[in-house]
Amino acid sequence: MTHTITRRMLCISTAILTIAGAVPLVTGAAQAADSIKLGIVAPMSGPNARYGAFSMRGAELAVKDINDAGGVDGMKIELFNADSQGTPVEGVSATRRLIDQDGVDFIIGDVSSSVTLAMQPVAEDAEVLLLNAASSNPKITYQAGVGGFKWTYRNYPTDENRALIVAKYAAEQRSFTKFAVLSVDSDYGRSAITFTKKYLPDFKGQILSEDYYKEGEVDFRSVLAKIRDNGAQAIIMYGLADTTPIVARQMIELGLAGKVTLIGNGEFNTEKTIKSAPSALEGAVEAAAWLPAFDSPASKAFVEKFTTTYKEAPNNHAYVHWDTVNLLAAAVKQAGSADKEKVRDALSKIKYKSPVGDVSFDDHNQARLPMILLQIENGKPSIKGAYTADIQYPAK
Amino acid sequence: MFSTVLEQFVNGIVTGSVYAIVAVGMTMIFGVLRAINFAHGEYYMLGTFGAWFAIDYLGLSYEASIVVGVLATVVVAYVIGQLVMRRMVGAPAESGVLATLGIALILQNAIIFVFGGGYKFFAGGYIEPVSILGFSLAQQRILILVVCLLVFVGLELMVTYSRLGMAMRAVSQNVDCCGVVGIDVPQVVLRTFILGAALAALSGVLTAPVNVSVYGGMGELITFKTLPIIIMGGLGNVRGTFFAAMILGVAESLVATYVGLQFRDTVGFATLILMLMWRPHGLFSTQARF
């Protein structure tokens, strides 16, 4: 008897709880009209935490400016944040959390290509607009737009473009022919090398050794000794910003500084990195989506504003997240509503003025954006040009 | 060819020295507690953070920061030892695993909470390269080697001759008999634990200048690298741990050179599996001690 009562009580209380839970959901849907719920998925801890912190600050700065100016057509942007730890598993649960618990309609994320690739199907299933701002693996937009995922957009140049211009510059301007690969073991590091290999034979370049490091690796002595002995002129490194100082320091330790040049991408150009190992980074060549020294009034204004707000100069990730929030706001304005479907359609047709040039999206939802090539000269980055390449999508 | 192999051998020995100092603490704690300390890498991290804090916030020299880092870790280890580790005496093995894993999470996230999750740049140390045997090496690495040797000679003497060392051996052999003859077992456990944590911290501070970066999650990898070492060395065996650490260090260095850097971490885990399959009692003893 007692059992029956308890069970019945359980049923009733569950029912009450369910109804009680549904009420705020209904009212929540009514509220959504006057605010734009935007989630940021970024690595806030783990080996890529530095990227996450910069991304978040960039986005916060843009949101603050937009909201202070009265919002987009009177709608304020509400910012949510979820930690991906830079791993696909955590990235997916962070995305789910933003969609299920915070009820966001728009997500900007992640920095790591491996995480973004894992997030794409989640966003697609939930029909939430995933606007990527910082992943460079070409596959992300190979499989977006007419390629498949209708809800993925990318406002960032790809590794294909990057690999081509770095290889071209290294061969033609620096006359390197012998290369060693030392990249991060991820979708970003590996795909950049795949495309480098595609273009290197055009410039008579040759790869002598190929190594990939795990995130968090700190001991590069073995590999650098091998590179010293095999006579490579340059190390092709598509790596993580936090690892660059470690590699550069150990290059000095092994006597490679000044003899072997770093080329690729991994924040070679920040003051902090150069200061950690000036002789190893002198002459380094990097292709980046953006850098603080980029010469345009809007870009300079952003650097100044960011620096006064956070007492630190912005990096690439701060910029692209700041820019992508502004892009989203422009799309909402053009759509005339925060309805995610209308915003998506507006994004496909948008002509947006970004600080690095005019942005529009192709039929794979990929923004046409330039890569900026720079070289470290006398301890300072010197810009050598900005190159846009049309992407050759693989035939389906 | 020969000089390359020799150089990689030396690289391996240096890496092995770092592992050895961390692993010996872990193996001693296992000896007296019969519990793997999954938070061991966290004391390595704490030591490094203490030193980084001393240099960046207090403006101290690197030498002084070594003392600050190790002392800070000793204080934390004393608190954790009093609150948690002492109670592990005689407790079932699962409680040790759960308690130490919990401590690992708390320490790691407390550091991330206070200092943020990003990499910090460690500025101190002797990073100037010197040339020996035809290849160059940072002075700091030579310091690591020397300190490792001193630590092991010291531990060997302590375990053999000192009162605490004898008590540690007694506790690792039979806890009940220790009680009968009047050895304060929880006290021995506490002291061993603090000693082990201090050694891990020392290893962290010594390695920081060559590893450059300091961050909350840095201890995790070290914990997993020390696992195969203490099993290879024979759980609780100080001398065995030293040789096992050197073997793993050299093997990792050779694999990184001749197979590929991406396979480096595989060495430790492969060793762990092989050891557990064929010689779970370690390389240096003929029968299982526990």
Image: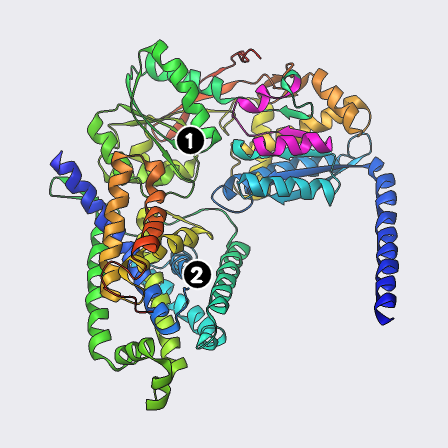
Where is residue A309? Give x, y as percent: 60, 42
Q: Can residue A218 be seen in this view?
A: no
Mark 2 and mark 1 residues within 8 Å of each other at the beta carbon = no
Q: What is the x, y in percent for residue B21?
A: 29, 60
Determine whether, in the image, residue A342 is placed left or right of residue B216: right
As measured in the structure, the alpha-carbon distance from the residue carrying label 2 to the one carrying label 1 is 39 Å
Hey, which quadrant is residue A326 in on the image?
A: top right
Residue B121 x %, y %: 40, 47
Q: Nearer the viewer, mark 2 or mark 1?
A: 2
Front residue of this view, candidates B180 and A332: B180
x and y percentages locating residue A280 in the rendered image: 30, 33
Residue sitting at 13 percent across and 37 percent down?
Answer: B3
SS of the residue under disc 2: loop
Q: In which quarter of the image is residue B226?
A: bottom left
Is A256 positioned to the left or the right of A130 in the image? left
Query: Label 1 is placed on what type of residue?
Result: Asn
Q: Identify residue type, mark 2.
A: Phe
Question: Mark 1, residues whose alpha carbon is within 10 Å: few (<14), some, or many (≥20)?
Answer: many
Residue at the image position 19 percent from the left and 73 percent from the top: B157
Report the side of B246 relative to A245 (left or right). left
Q: Mark 2 points at which residue?
A: B38
Identify whether A106 is placed above or below A286. Answer: below
Dot 2: within a 10 Å radius of its alpha carbon, few (fewer than 14), some, or many (20 or more) residues? many
In the figure, A281 relative to B268: above or below?
Answer: above
Does the magenta-highlighted stretch encompass residue A134?
yes
Q: What is the chain identity of the residue bearing mark 2?
A: B
Residue A269 circle label: 1
Which residue is most to the front?
A: A1
Q: In which quarter of the image is the C terminus of chain B?
A: bottom left
Residue B1 vertical position relative to residue B39 in the rendered view, above or below: above
Magenta segment = A116-145
Residue B149 among those drawn in magenta:
no
